[in-house]
Image (cartoon, rainbow, N blue to C red):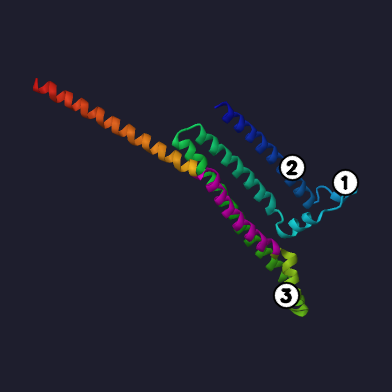
Amino acid sequence: MAAQRDNGFLGGVLSGAASAALGGLMLLYIAARTDAIELRGLAGFETPAWFSWLDHNLGLALPLFVVIVILFVQTLGELRRRIARHESADRIGQMDHMADIWTSLFFGIGVIWTAIGMRNALLHALGDPGSTLEQGAFAILQRMVDGGILVALSTTIVGGVGGYLMRVIKTVVVGAQLKRSYATHGREDARAIRESLDSMNRHLEGMAGDGEA
């Protein structure tokens, strides 16, 4: 039991540290993207290639994806702890439901940002119909790229792949324990009902015996 508590404490510390690090990186990303700070002015810091790639392909959807992942990991950890402590089915089911909600929201962010990116790309491409027709099809495609079509497509991929991975991770990490916990609680409920019925039968038999006497 002590080893289990130590493992839970260590897991909580590592999860908190990882969440804090990811949160700090996302704050830096948002600040740099919105020009709140200038990365090039930080001790000659050059904007890395991965930052530019994330900026062009995910935009401000990236911090939301990261927040959902952090919440999902923390919820999964709490679900494991509640199962290990043999808490009530209601409390275990609450965390189970929250993990499913974060997975659905991850899918949802991909869908919502797809619509936002497509809308922005179309508006940017067709903003000046006269000049667009004169420039040709390639110019329209370039304006759609500049308007956010890459964000629309990339967030669809990330939302779909990430959402399915979250489902797989939940099944691998807590699937067997969760099923076993629900089965245990079901047997306990059935046993309690059976004991209650047996008690009622004994009480009725006692009343019948008193009546015959």
- Where residue 92 appears, x then y in whole percent? 49, 38
Residue extending furthest toward the right: 44
Name the amino acid, label 3. Answer: Pro
Instruction: Answer whether residue 122 is magenta in the image.
Output: no
Expressed as whole percent of the image width and height from the top left, the position of residue 13 reads: 66, 34
Which numbered mark, 3 or 1, is in the foreground of this view?
1
Magenta stretch in the rendered image: 150-175
Amino acid type at circle 2 is: Gly
Badges 1 and 2: C-beta atoms under 8 Å apart? no
**Residue labelled with disc 1:** 42
How much space separates mark 1 and mark 2, taking CA atoms? 16 Å
Residue position for label 3 = 129
Q: Residues within 10 Å of mark 2 (few under 14, many from 20)?
A: few
User: Under tag 2, what secondary structure?
Assistant: helix
Name the residue tied to disc 2.
24
Query: Which one is in front, 37 or 198?
Result: 198
Give the distance between the C-alpha atoms of the residues marked 2 and 3, in whole angstroms. Answer: 43 Å
Q: Looking at the rendering, which quadrant does residue 204 occupy?
A: top left
Q: Work out which residue is located at the far left of the displayed protein and give it.
A: 212
- The answer to whether the residues at label 2 and label 3 have Cβ atoms under 8 Å apart is no
